[in-house]
Image (cartoon, rainbow, N blue to C red):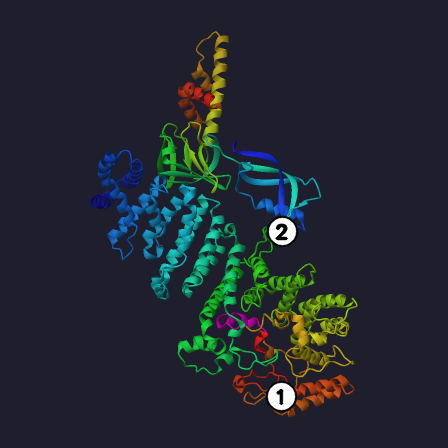
Amino acid sequence: MDALKVSEGKMVVYLHPSKTKVISESIKRELSSHLFKFSDTFDGVLLAYEVVEVPSKLAKILSGLDPYLAVRLKANLLLFAPKPDTFLEGKVVKIARESIHVVILGFSAAVITEEDIRDEFKFKIKNGQEIFRSTSQKRHVIKVGTMVRFLVKSFDEEILHVSGSLIPASTGSICWLSKNSEEASRNCRKQRESEGRREERSTGTVDGGALSDEYHVLKKPRKQKVHEGNTTKLDSGRAEMVVNQ
Amino acid sequence: MGAEIGNINNGKMIEEELDIDFTDSELVSHVRHALKSVALTSILFASVGVLLTVYLSTTARLQGDNDNYSQLVGLLHYNERLKADEVALLVTSLKAISGAVSYIDNVQHESLLTSVFSMSMWNYGPDVMDAMVDLITSLAASNGKYVDACLDMLVSNFSPPFRFIESLKLPYGKAKKEQVLDRVHFALECITDLIPLAPSRLLPIVMHRIHAIYQRTPEPVILMFVENIFKLESSAIGELVGNKRLISIVIDLLIDFDVQVGWDDILEENPHKGIFDMELEDEQILADIDDDGDDFAREFGGYGRIWKNGVVETLGKLDSIMVLTFEHLNCCKHSGRLVEVHSTLFVTVFESLLESFCQTVMNVYKSKFAQFVIFYACSLDPENCGVRFAEFLAGKFIESSVPPIIRMSAVAYLASYLSRAKFLSAPFVTGMLERLADWCKKYCQQSVSINPEAHKVFYAGCQAIMYVLCFNMRSIMEIPRLKSHLCFLPFREILKSPLEPLKVCLPSIVEEFVRQAKSAHLIDAKSGNPVFHDVLESELSKAFGGKERLDMFFPFDPCLLRKSDSYIRPTFVYWSTVKKAYEDDLDFSSDDDVDVFYPDMNTAESRDVELEGAFEEDDYFDDYHDSLNKMSITPKDSILKKRPNGKCTPLQMPSRLRPSMSPESL
């Protein structure tokens, strides 16, 4: 995921004298108090940290009412920083007619409103469950529990709320997208191979269709049908996928 | 537009059999249109300086659309006895707004938002409540800006509006309460499903609200709030909100009420009694009240006898909150949440209580009631919680980096706890005494001399040991293994050290201890002991107690709150029921009507004869005997009409305890 990054940070932690009995505990406590909060310094939400090194056993004492200790340390930080126009992935927790609610990494909430869902998807209630199903690709279904990829429109740093969009074609159910792209690339390869072989063989009736029959033998009947359906649209789909990758 | 809305409503009824989706979308788009119209109007307002004439004409046109919005807002203010169609209208509108939440802007649609957030679920029926829950959930999930306001609205629904308070006692009030609270907590859980970090924002909101309400509001409102806090704590999102903090909110509330009542608000009948004096048991409180008195007398009569009238209300609140807490602890115990030994998080309710106790209760100057919460929790699970609490206190006392005041307070709590808890076993108490005695012995091995202030921690420790032994001497001595264990403890060394604890500690305790110890052959003081002339305290004890008078701090003395006391009573040791070491098992006649206290010490002397026989050569004892005789012990006779049967009898010292009090009245 684009939004996750690991940074190495050199920082100073200021500890109150009452907390200096067990320094490592106090450092952990201090750093933990910053978890799941957006930090301008790191430009991201701190998700996890690992104290790598405390270089020196000495710490400066700050002058002032309370003599805080300035402890220097190095830590690895896992940061979450979604930027607009990047892709994020999350799990759908609620589907409503006007919105899809997604939770990212178990802590950040994202909402995709109706205007940001491409027209291809229609809201339906199937077997008592609300779903969004693509009208063009019947197998492309978004329901509660699906992992989806979406585009980030905006990110509210205070409440860690993302506003997302399903307009771009490469967004949608990850499961379907990856399967589809796999098949598309496999078909791509097969077609190139078949074209290559066609040149070698003298008997000229081998075309994409014949090869795909061979292909069918290996696959299950259900997918066979899909495959057939897709082969006709393959060229345009393939082109699209190449672009988006 | 009213007609139009009406049409939609009728439309809905007609189209029920048709595709429902269509109707909902129409409503949602209607609302969106209304919301957008406000946006347009405000844009025009901005450009008014330039396009004045255009503005005037366009607003005239848009006025009609703005009416939609105003009507929508107005609809949300319906709350007086709605008829069926008004209810339907409200439900439909709320559902339509839920669909259009993405169009709501917090600036332009401020009036709508304010109306939504000020709605109280208590005013409506279940259908409207459900619609409100949907709306609030959608609103919270749609935009981060509204999360806090939505949570605040839900928390404000924890307690009913004032006019509803009276109806709470009636069945329909109780039913409504169930409906509202179930939905509120359900809404909180729904919001958490959609916004995982929402619970962490809930805590400050709850705290803010409780601080705002606790002073002026009537008892049922506060109680309902506390009930909700407990419900939240034990709900699925309790851990996410922070169980510890929720419990500490309640304990802080108890402390706030506790400190509003001063010790001098107790009406004293005879302030010059010793520590082991009359104990205010319930029987005494009710002694002069007729059984067929009215509720008021029964409710307040007890309090009135011991508390001044001004604090009765505060005490009532405090009492009820404590009862709620006890009930919650009971539930936790039954559902296994009190102590989760194998839990990976090890965040248990008891640990939260203990931490809260450590941070707030222990630091309060002579907390009166709040400590009984932890007493009750310990009584529910003696092996784990009971032991843990005692060890925690002992640890605090022994730890040298803890400030002296805290150490003294900890040992006072420990002494009172070990004495008053019926559920602690004698071996455990002996073990604790050993720890205290070992520490005291190490301390007095430094060559120092008597100095109450400098060695106040030591004196506090000694007094604690003596106090515990006053209560438990007999029961420990009855078990041979423990008796020998106890006899090996270095009491002689401690008591005869140059620090002279017997002179410094509270005289009444020293006397009682020495008396029992002699009977039990625990110590045999050949050297002289100071003679006390019937004093409660001495200059020296005041000195070691300091200005907080920690020498006279017995926190677990009988709880003076009636309702709470009934929970505590089964596991509580009253001084009158304690078997003292100097009592033997001969069967004295146990007439309840016998005036057990004699102005002339005849019977006392008869007992002395027996004791004298055993200790003939003891000089000390003669002095002691004299001092005992000099004590005047004429309690109020009304208090003693009922005495427990079969209990040991005439003692020279009156045998009951009274809550320790501040020294100002002396």
Q: How many marks?
A: 2
- Circle number at residue A37: none
Residue type, label 1? Phe
Density class for disc 2 (Cα within 10 Å; few <14, some 14-19, many ≥20) is few
Q: Does residue B339 sit above or below B59 in this rendering?
A: below
SS of the residue under disc 1 = loop
| Chain for disc number 2 | A
Q: Quadrant of residue B414?
A: bottom right
Q: For mark 2, what is the residue?
A: A66
**Residue displayed at 65% across by 77% down:** B537
Query: Do marks 1 and 2 both belong to one polypeptide chain?
Result: no
Residue type, label 2? Asp
Q: For mark 1, what is the residue?
A: B588
Pick the residue in front: B131 or B586: B131
Q: Position of residue B617 (x, y in %)?
A: 79, 86
Q: Residue furthest front?
A: B49
Q: Position of residue B189 (x, y in %)?
A: 44, 49
Q: Are marks 1 and 2 in contact (CB under 8 Å)?
A: no
Residues shaded magenta = B559-573
Pick the residue in front: B6 or B332: B6
Magenta highlight on residue A175:
no
* B269 lies left or right of B488: left
